[in-house]
Amino acid sequence: MELLQNILVGLLLLAGGGFAFFGAVGVLRFPDVYTRMHAASKSGTVGSGLLLLAVAVYAGDLGVAIRCLAAIVFLLLTAPVAAHLLSRAAYLAGYKPDPSTRLDAYGPALRRQRRSAAAAENEPG
């Protein structure tokens, strides 16, 4: 049983390290802030989650496993929100997507929001 546990821990560590490595490669190679943010947030979340899962399996203690699972849930809930807010701040600061980006869904929505805010501001009342 201990051999199987060590093999599982090793596979989880390799997978987590692989996600972290390929996320770092993506941060270095992708063309703009948005694709880099995507690579960093996705690989960081999955890689860290796999590493924490390896810790939980290796420890074999229920208390450690619960703390690791709580940290994984925390990462899954907060990392996408943080990446979204950073990307939105970059867009509002004027960082344009790479020209190879096919869809800019936020641009038209932002223009509509600004037009309706300006119209509401100009209404008498």
Image (tube, rainbow, N blue to C red):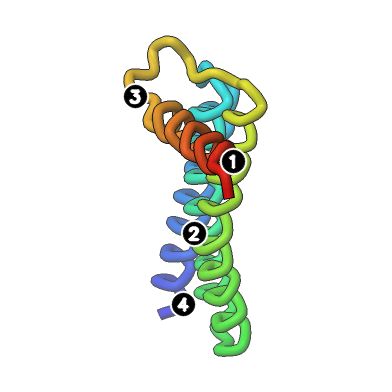
Whether residues under marks 3 and 1 lie with C-beta atoms below 8 angstroms apart, the answer is no
Tell me the distance, in whole angstroms, between the alpha carbons under discs 4 and 2.
19 Å
Q: Nearer the viewer, mark 4 or mark 2?
A: 2
Q: Amino acid at mark 2?
A: Leu
> To which residue does mark 1 refer?
121
Of pointers 4 and 2, the one earlier in the residue sequence? 4
Q: Residue at x 58, y 26 (%)?
A: 33
> To which residue does mark 2 refer?
50
Of pointers 3 and 2, the one earlier in the residue sequence? 2
Which of the two residues, 49 or 104, is positioned nearer the viewer here?
104
Tell me the distance, in whole angstroms, between the alpha carbons under discs 1 and 2.
50 Å
Vertical comparison of 14 with 58: above or below = above
> To which residue does mark 4 refer?
2
Indicate the secondary structure of the residue bearing disc 3.
loop
Indicate the secondary structure of the residue bearing disc 1.
helix
Vertical comparison of 44 with 65: above or below = above
Image coordinates for residue 29, horizontal then vertical, percent: 53, 19
Asked if one can make out residue 83 in the rendered structure from this viewpoint, the answer is no
Q: Amino acid at mark 1?
A: Glu
Whether residues under marks 4 and 2 lie with C-beta atoms below 8 angstroms apart, the answer is no
Of pointers 3 and 1, the one earlier in the residue sequence? 3
Q: Amino acid at mark 4?
A: Glu
* Mark identifier at residue 103: 3
Which of the two residues, 41 or 109, is positioned nearer the viewer here?
109
